[in-house]
Image (cartoon, grey):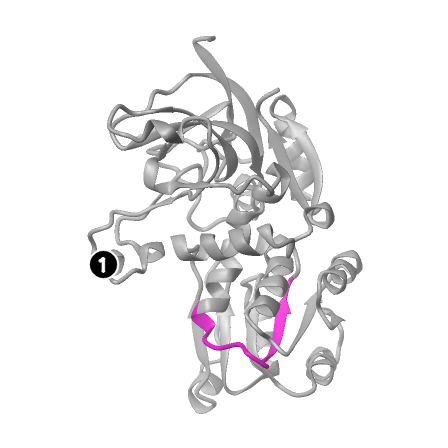
């Protein structure tokens, strides 16, 4: 085996390169995964452009990962070697007040594989990646690698739908239907939503959302946006998934919510913004932050994918070899390209 491997490096704003890095060895409680596919997340493109409030280059990307366990530390289960797995990239301490309560996604010492400027856990947009054994999820044989690479991003809206409460029969709006917005449509419908209506600025995104299960789609720039969306829902929304996270979409969300409705902030806001607090108070609106997922959410997402509930051929739009990472990031940054993935091996 060669002494080095190929690794994508985001060295600064608009600076993507492929470097040679030492092949890592697993320490206690860890495994090494030979990466098969790695997805490019919106967090990656936003960080590259300087629009992410928390992820600041330089960093080693790659947190949407599927691969094969290649090596395991001596204290691990050797039966895992050779297993196809999905990686849970959020690494929790297991001992803080939130972890003890089962809210590992809100760990007080939360770390990230491939989505962390500290470099504690280098990302998997590489030939190999080191992962805590507890963050490995073996894949059913019937789930392809291309379907499996969507499990991690699907887990985010699955988590949002779960903490929203009972969605059975609810009127649900999804604002912004990039990858996470599309998957929010799927997650809301899987959770029992009665009707899901989406909005976006891009016609192609709106059309794709309808193909994936949205009842209607509204132009986010329409002058009578609120009236159109409420009419399409058949009444004010019970729940809104804001998958953009801007001041404008927060205002749009509040404009279509019923009294005592729930606003889920799923998209990562680029900056602070004004929230219409008078209506939040007077209408007793619930504004709920939604941050990543727990192991239970990944299990749910995997079950949805295994049941054929997430058509990867309509979501994954392009695949690039790791050597073409610059082109892959450029395609992902277009915003209309769908999910872009890289394949480090082969």
In the rendered image, residue 208, in percent from the top left (x then y), is placed at 76, 58
Q: Tell me which residue sits at (29%, 54%) in the image.
A: 107
Q: Nearer the viewer, residue 208 or 225?
A: 208
Residue 47 seen in the figure: yes
**Looking at the image, which is closer to me, 96 or 60?**
96
The residue drawn where x is 58% and y is 68% is 188
Q: Is residue 167 magenta?
A: yes
- Badge 1 marks a residue whose secondary structure is helix
Horizontal relation, residue 119 to residue 36: left or right: left
Q: Using the rendered view, name the quadrant where residue 340 is placed.
A: top right
Instruction: Say whether residue 95 is left or right of residue 115.
Output: left
Q: Residue 79: say if magenta.
A: no
Screen quadrant of the C terminus? top right
When the figure is inspected, residue 314 is found, relative to residue 22, above or below; the finding is: below
Position in image of residue 22 (x %, y %)? 41, 15
Expressed as whole percent of the image width and height from the top left, the position of residue 105 reads: 36, 55
Q: Give the class, few, some or many, for how many residues have Cα within 10 Å of label 1's Cα (few <14, many ≥20).
A: few
At horizontal 45% and vertical 51% (from top left) the residue drawn is: 53
273 vs 231: above or below: above
On the image, which quarter does residue 174 sit in? bottom right
Instruction: Point out the residue furthest to the top here.
Output: 2
Is residue 270 shown to the viewer in this render?
Answer: no
Which residue in the structure is indicated by mark 1? Answer: 100
- On the picture, is 327 further left or further right than 293? right
Please state the total of marks drawn on the protein image: 1
Report x, y in % for residue 131: 37, 34
Extent of the magenta region: 163-176
Decide which of 98, 346 is in the foreground and name it: 346
């Amino acid at each position: 085996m060669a002494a080095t491997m190929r690794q994508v490096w985001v060295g600064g704003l608009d600076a993507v390169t492929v470097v040679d890095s030492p092949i890592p060895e697993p320490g206690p409680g860890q495994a090494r995964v030979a990466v098969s596919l790695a997805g490019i997340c919106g967090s990656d493109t936003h960080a590259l452009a300087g629009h992410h409030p928390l992820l600041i280059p330089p960093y080693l990307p790659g947190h949407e990962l599927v691969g094969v366990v290649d090596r395991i530390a001596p204290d691990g289960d050797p039966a895992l070697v050779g297993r196809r797995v999905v990686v849970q990239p959020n690494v929790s301490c297991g001992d803080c007040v939130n972890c003890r309560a089962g809210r590992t996604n809100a760990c007080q010492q939360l770390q990230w594989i491939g989505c962390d400027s500290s470099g504690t856990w280098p990302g998997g947009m590489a030939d190999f990646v080191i992962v805590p054994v507890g963050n490995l999820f073996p894949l059913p044989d019937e789930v392809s690698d291309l379907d499996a690479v969507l499990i991690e991003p699907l887990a985010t809206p699955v988590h949002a739908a779960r903490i929203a409460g009972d969605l059975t029969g609810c009127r649900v709006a999804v604002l912004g239907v990039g990858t996470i917005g599309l998957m929010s449509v799927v997650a809301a419908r899987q959770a029992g939503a009665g009707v899901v209506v989406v909005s976006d600025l891009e016609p192609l995104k709106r059309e794709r959302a309808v193909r994936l299960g949205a009842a209607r789609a509204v132009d986010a720039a329409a002058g009578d946006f609120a009236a159109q969306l409420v009419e399409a829902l058949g009444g004010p929304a019970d729940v809104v998934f804001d998958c953009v996270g801007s001041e404008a979409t927060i205002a749009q969300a509040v404009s279509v919510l019923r009294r005592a409705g729930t606003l889920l902030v799923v998209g990562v806001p680029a900056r602070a913004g004004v929230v219409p607090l008078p209506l939040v108070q007077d209408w007793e609106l619930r504004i709920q932050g939604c941050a990543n997922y727990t192991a239970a959410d990944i299990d749910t997402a995997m079950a949805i994918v295994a049941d054929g509930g997430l058509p990867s051929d309509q979501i994954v739009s392009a695949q690039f070899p790791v050597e073409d990472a610059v082109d892959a990031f450029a395609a992902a940054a277009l915003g209309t390209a769908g999910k872009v993935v890289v394949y480090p091996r082969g």
